[in-house]
Amino acid sequence: MAAKASTLGLRIAREAFLRADYDACVEILRGRRGAERDFLLARTYLRMRRHDDAERVLRASRAKKRSTWAALTGAAIGRQGDTDGARALIEVALATARTQEERAEARYQRALLHWMLHETDAASAILENEDFGTFSAVAEELRAWLAVERADYASAIRRFEQAATLAGADLMVVTASLSNAAIYAREMYIPAVMSGVLHRVESVARTPYLELTLYQITRAAAWFAAIDGDFARAMQQFSALDSFQVERSWHVFALCDRAYLSLALGEEVNGWLVADQALALADQLEWETFKGSERVALLYLANVFALHRPLQAQRCWRRYKAVPEPGPFSAAFRHEPHVEAWEHFTAGLVEKGLGNAPAAAAHFNRAYSIYRRLGFEWRAVLTLVAERDITPDDRTYDEYIDTVLRRFPNSWLGLIADRERRHHASVTSIA
């Protein structure tokens, strides 16, 4: 009877794990014993980013001779910074693996560690032909991140979508993969991908550990609406982000979204009101304490303020540059050329606002060349439009702007382009 109760408890805990109800999973496993309990509890703590708790559970386990123990302990200490110790334990896991599942997990953890250490060729070699079995979804997710680092965003999107499919009922992997597919589809403007993502998450219940991934999907969907010219829907979705229980740093993004679009639409009073709210919130936060890509909100703030309040923008820009880069396990915005492009674009706006036209033009040119290479067309157009009044006329730039805007006839991009052209024409006539 006790064995049946233990098995039932583990099954219920696994169900909670799959639906990303990690607090419930921990509670169910509390007070239980056994290797499978230890491994599931450690996996849960790793998902919760409580890496020290995962290590504590594993150190107290009686299953230290198991390959799974070595693989998970390597993961736990590696994510706390002990990468040498992690590498040694993962080698032990490989040497002691007795089943295909154990071998697959050890190989995946080895590939993940290589990726974390910027050893991308080694990670790719492991992932190339291996059958990862029950770890196929996370292996495919890692392949997607490797594609991102190669700036092969089309491949990355496909792999994120495939990872979500392979993940089945594991909602954390499903929503994380789909949110990344949505983010990069937004940059490349691939409506079919966004539509598919929204369809796949419409029945997913929000839990505390899914809030951020669903928040990112909602943001991406709002920008798709803005690009398509459905501004009311975009604003509605931006406002809906206020209901998500995410770190306050992410709410800075949502406020910047609303401010940016309001200003683009000529709604100056509301735009600056929301922009000031974003700045006030940002000033309350200790950005150095965040371990992910949250600091990019400061870059966004500098974008919003650059042309009309350049000193404020310069302060945000300097603060952004002073915040340490994300840790090695923060995949988003890691080693990506489009982040470099956005930094150059922002620096160009800041320099332009301060009246430093040559410096601004140099930054804009760098941003534009990166965006064109990556295929991020609407961002390339924004860059050219911002540069329009500080560089000599270039017919090829105008032709490119017109060509891209034909893809987005109702977008806010057209409004900005028309406004800048009118400004440029008036400045030229005065000169």
Image (cartoon, rainbow, N blue to C red):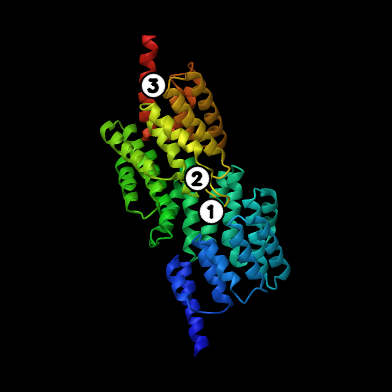
Circle 3/circle 1 CB separation < 8 Å: no
Q: In the depicted view, which residue is nearer to us: 254 or 325?
A: 325
- Residue 273 spot, x, y in % from top left: 28, 36
- Identify the residue at horizontal 43%, vertical 30% (top origin): 314
Residue furthest right in the image: 95
Q: Earlier in the sequence, mark 1 or mark 2?
A: 1
The residue beneath circle 1 is: 160
Q: Are marks 1 and 2 in contact (CB under 8 Å)?
A: yes
Whole-number angstrom distance, CA of label 1 to CA of label 2: 10 Å
- Mark 1, Cα crowd under 10 Å, few <14 / some 14-19 / many 20+, is many
Expressed as whole percent of the image width and height from the top left, the position of residue 289 reads: 47, 48
User: How far is disc 2 from disc 3 in space, using C-alphas?
Assistant: 29 Å
Q: Secondary structure at mark 3?
A: helix
In the structure shown, which secondary structural element does the residue marked by tag 2 occupy? helix
- Pick the residue in front: 333 or 174: 333
Q: Which residue is mark 3?
A: 421
The answer to whether residue 223 is above or below residue 418 is: below
Image: 67 above or below 143: below
Separation of disc 3 and disc 1 at Cα? 39 Å
Q: Nearer the viewer, residue 109 or 139?
A: 109
**Residue type, label 3:** Arg
Image quarter hosting the C terminus: top left
Q: Residue furthest left?
A: 269
> Going 52% across and 87% down the picture, which residue do you hit?
3
The image's mark for residue 184 is: 2
Based on the displayed image, in which of its 4 quarters is residue 138 positioned?
bottom right
Which residue is more in the foreground, 143 or 287? 287
Give the mark, 3 or 1, whose residue is nearer the N terminus.
Answer: 1
